[in-house]
Image (spheres, helix red, strand yellow):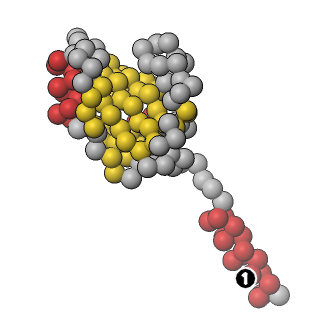
Amino acid sequence: MKALLRFLLFALVAAWFALPSMGTDGGEGAGGTGVWILPRPTFLASASGCGGSGAVRGSTSIPADAPLTLKACDELGLFTATLVDPLSGASTLLPCNGFQVALSSDLLRTLRETCGSAHVVIADGTQLGYLIQITFDSASGAGVVKVF
């Protein structure tokens, strides 16, 4: 009987560890770590574009002088991330590490001081990805990141 009770206790503890638990470090801001977990990607050929013409699927606020890391969904294949300046149309490749795209604090500060906004396009070979708009408030310097 003791062996049966011990086995039952062991099975209950193992089941308790195996059950998923509620996490708090996901979604917008990731608990203040500077990593923003992006929603599921969409096909960019079907997206209607940035600048308010498409539906905003997610948004977050970013502080004035902090780096930002965008964590893409693992449904994407090998992807590239490009930052596009809306004033000049110039594009810049962003560093990608695995499923993360890094926007340094220096880059965000330069965007805030020069043009106040930028677009980020993250896409894989099948045109699955994200259209992202970054805008900065000229008074406070804080930014808003929107995913379309």
Mark 1 Cα within 10 Å, few/some/many (few <14, many 20+)?
A: few
Q: Position of residue 77 (x, y in %)?
A: 48, 49
The amino acid type found where label 1 is placed reads Arg
Q: Is residue 34 visible?
A: no
Indicate whether 100 appears above or below 81: below
Q: Residue at x 17, y 33 (%)?
A: 106
Quadrant of the image occupied by residue 60: top left
Give the side of residue 7 with respect to residue 98, left or right: right
Q: Is residue 4 visible?
A: yes
Q: Residue at x 27, y 20 (%)?
A: 89
Indicate whether 28 appears above or below 86: below
Viewer-closest of 46 and 132:
46
On-image quarter of the N terminus: bottom right
Mark 1 lies on residue: 6
Viewer-closest of 69 and 130:
130
Q: Position of residue 2 (x, y in %)?
A: 77, 87
Give the side of residue 140 with respect to residue 15, left or right: left
Q: Residue at x 35, y 24 (%)?
A: 119
Give the side of residue 55 with respect to residue 63, left or right: right
Give the side of residue 139 with respect to residue 14, left or right: left
* Total number of numbered discs in the rendering: 1
Q: Residue at x 66, y 60 (%)?
A: 19
* Element on which disc 1 rests: helix
